[in-house]
Image (tube, grey):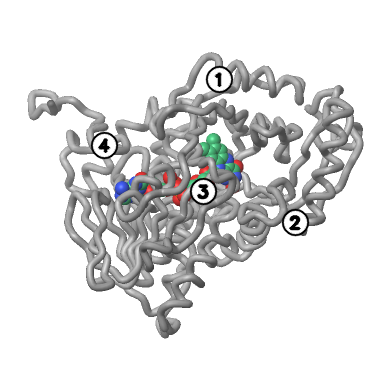
Amino acid sequence: MYDVIIIGSGIVGACVAHYLVPYNLKILLLEKNNEVASGVTKANSAIIHPGYDPKPGTLKARLNVEGNKLYEELTKTLNIPFKRTGSLTVALNEEEEKELINLHERGKVNGVETYLISGDEARKREPNLSDNIRMALYAPTTGILAPWDVVFAVLENAIVNGLELRLNNEVKSITKENDLFKVTTNQGEYLSKYVINAAGLHAIDITKMVSTPDYEMVYTRGQYYLLDRDTNFVESVIYPTPTKLGKGILIVPTIHGNILLGPTSETVPSATNDEVTKDGLKYVKDNVNKMAKNVPYEHVIREFSGVRPKTNAGDFIIRELDDVPGFIELAGIESPGLSAAPAIGIMVRDMILAKVDAKLKENYKIRPFKRQMIMEKTPEEINELVKKNPKYGKIICRCEHITEGEIIDAINGPLKINTIDGIKRYLRPGAGRCQGGFCQVLVLDIIARETGMRKLDILLNNQGSNILAAEKGGAKND
Ligand SMILES: Cc1cc2nc3c(=O)[nH]c(=O)nc-3n(C[C@H](O)[C@H](O)[C@H](O)COP(=O)(O)OP(=O)(O)OC[C@H]3O[C@@H](n4cnc5c(N)ncnc54)[C@H](O)[C@@H]3O)c2cc1C
């Protein structure tokens, strides 16, 4: 029996786990997929927004600003790469200038530092900005990170401190009897005093298992171009002036040195509509070209999209259901959900602690993220590592310089990652220019060797995504 079951291992479920794990509570995290951070958290703009934009007084405004501050400590404590790049929100005409002035005032109400600067000052900071930019709003607290890094680091720490994680466990039904929830998945039944629904795009489906949602989903797709690393096109995040539709098409440097262009904002029929379309990508280009010159489109290495778990409620939905005490619903966690996630984690922790008398664990000990990134080390450090283990000297991914030693560590780490995409997100083999053309098969071999799995059973990501159809002269997949 558990004290708390969390459904969903995205950034929100992970942050809730992070802030609950120091307490003497038995916690189970259920995830339907093969890997953590494989929902909305894997495909977004990866910006820790400053928080001047959300409407004052909303949960989005409060939790965005708090979350932005909390990332400072969270990333330092757990050793997660994070950079405060700052951002420029640009105005191309008089109307947009007026809107920037409004946003500057809104920033004051939300408690966010912003500065209005001229177009020339903006171009001094970012020489590739368009000559048509007349004014910009500079926000120094905007940051960037890899959202899945946060999930990996937080959950590795949580697991060594007692969290139970069960992957491939899709919640199918929830019932409540005698103050206990029975959560049934495709793998088994689990009893718990509290249930936290952090199922992202599917939070509404989980809520329907116990109650009647009073909101509707408005699934909204965002399409992107990803540029190769080291174009150095921009240093800071570039936002257009926002409209009713949202933040608009952005230019975003990533923590790994790539550039993201996007996302679109298109209502789609379902959570699975994550296609990339010709029209969507044209819209991205047209809008980027309004804000910037010399855009290095020749360095595009990938196009992708993500779907926002937006609802018609207009704000995050974070509450204990009145008709189902003990069931905490986290729905509509669209942007700025990544930025707000640590603050959501603390808010939910406090909701649970208000109900149970849980003490801090005596043996709780922070475990900083232990991932080795060979490419980021000095030649001397690399030599030392290679002396201890020559596998740290064997490059598997040529684009991102990822070694066999790092891949073996990921497979044998607390999260026991064993899919191609899981390893790619954890370390980046396959995330570079060739997109796995050279290294995918090598990574597959290493996973098979280290785990003892049949090569035929190794998946790209979810069930049914087997990479190989047949082994030469041997077994076959259907
Ligand atoms: C295009 C786009 C751009 C964005 N840009 C930003 C940004 O720059 N900054 C920002 O702050 N926010 C941004 N966001 C929002 C942010 O990405 C989300 O708010 C955040 O990732 C939501 O995390 P989550 O944990 O709630 O959901 P998810 O990451 O989707 O996690 C939910 C998990 O629940 C699992 N699950 C679902 N159903 C079940 C079930 N039945 N049983 C078990 N498990 C289940 C899923 O598999 C998934 O792993 C963006 C979103 C999009 C789509």
For label 4, the crowd category at 10 Å Cα-Cα, with few meaning under 14, some 14 to 19 and many 20 or more, is many
> Residue at left 30%, top 31%?
441
**How far is the residue under mark 4 from the one under mark 2?**
45 Å
| SS under mark 2 | helix
| SS under mark 3 | loop
**Where is residue 332 drawn, in percent x and y?**
50, 47
Q: Is residue 274 above or below residue 375?
A: above
**Where is residue 19 drawn, in percent x and y?**
48, 68
For label 1, the crowd category at 10 Å Cα-Cα, with few meaning under 14, some 14 to 19 and many 20 or more, is many
Q: Name the residue under label 2.
A: 110
Q: Mark 4 or 1 closer to N-term? A: 1
Q: Which residue lies furthest to the left in this view?
A: 474
Q: Give the quarter of the figure containing the N terminus.
A: bottom left
> Residue at left 59%, top 63%?
76
Residue at mark 2: C-beta within 8 A of ligand 1: no
Disc 2 marks a residue whose amino acid type is Asn
**How far is the residue under mark 3 from the one under mark 1?**
23 Å
**How far is the residue under mark 4 from the one under mark 1?**
29 Å
Q: Mark 1 or 2 closer to N-term? A: 2
Instruction: Depth check: give the residue in front, 471 or 196.
Output: 196
For label 3, the crowd category at 10 Å Cα-Cα, with few meaning under 14, some 14 to 19 and many 20 or more, is many
**Where is residue 339 drawn, in percent x and y?**
60, 52
For label 2, the crowd category at 10 Å Cα-Cα, with few meaning under 14, some 14 to 19 and many 20 or more, is many
Q: Name the residue under label 3.
A: 333
- Eye-nearest disc, 3 or 4: 3
Disc 3 marks a residue whose amino acid type is Ile
Q: Name the residue under label 4.
A: 459
